[in-house]
Image: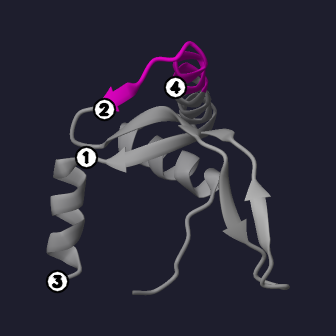
Amino acid sequence: MKKNKINRTQLIEALADRLGISNTQSEKFLMTFIETVTDNLKKGKEVNITGFGNFRVVRRKERMGVNPKTGKSMKINSSISVAWRVGKTLKENIRKVFK
């Protein structure tokens, strides 16, 4: 699999082309989407986009780990992060391409 990437600007342009709208409108859509997901995660809500995926806040417990440079044990503090789980439809569509 190649490590090709698409950046934010390219995504905005691709959305604009597919939707037949300006890049400005496309950027506004993308930023509104990101802000809406972020706002709901801040409220403790999960964001489920059927077929695409599920965003949720996860709390990681404090645990012991190993410093890879020294090999010594170290405490890893608890943390809060965002997790994303791929949706079934997206997963199946990608698997078809890379078989």
Residue at image mark 2: 49
Residue at image mark 4: 37
- Is residue 68 left or right of 84 when viewed as pictured? right
**Marks 4/3: CA–CA distance:** 32 Å
Q: Position of residue 57 (x, y in %)?
A: 52, 32
First reached walking from the N terminus: tag 4 or tag 3: 4
Q: Position of residue 18 (x, y in %)?
A: 37, 45
- Three-letter amino acid code at the position of disc 2: Ile
- Three-letter amino acid code at the position of disc 3: Lys
**Marks 2/3: CA–CA distance:** 25 Å
Q: Position of residue 43 (x, y in %)?
A: 56, 12
To which quarter of the image does residue 39 belong?
top right
Q: Residues within 10 Å of mark 2 (few under 14, many from 20)?
A: few
**Marks 4/2: CA–CA distance:** 10 Å
Q: Residue furthest top?
A: 43
Q: Residue furthest right?
A: 70
First reached walking from the N terminus: tag 2 or tag 3: 2
- Three-letter amino acid code at the position of disc 1: Gly
- Is residue 87 left or right of 7 when viewed as pictured? left
Considering depth in this image, is 2 or 44 the residue closer to the camera?
A: 44
- Three-letter amino acid code at the position of disc 4: Val
Residue at image mark 1: 87
Magenta-colored span: 35-48
Residue at image mark 3: 99
**Marks 2/1: CA–CA distance:** 8 Å
Answer yes or no: is residue 66 visible: yes
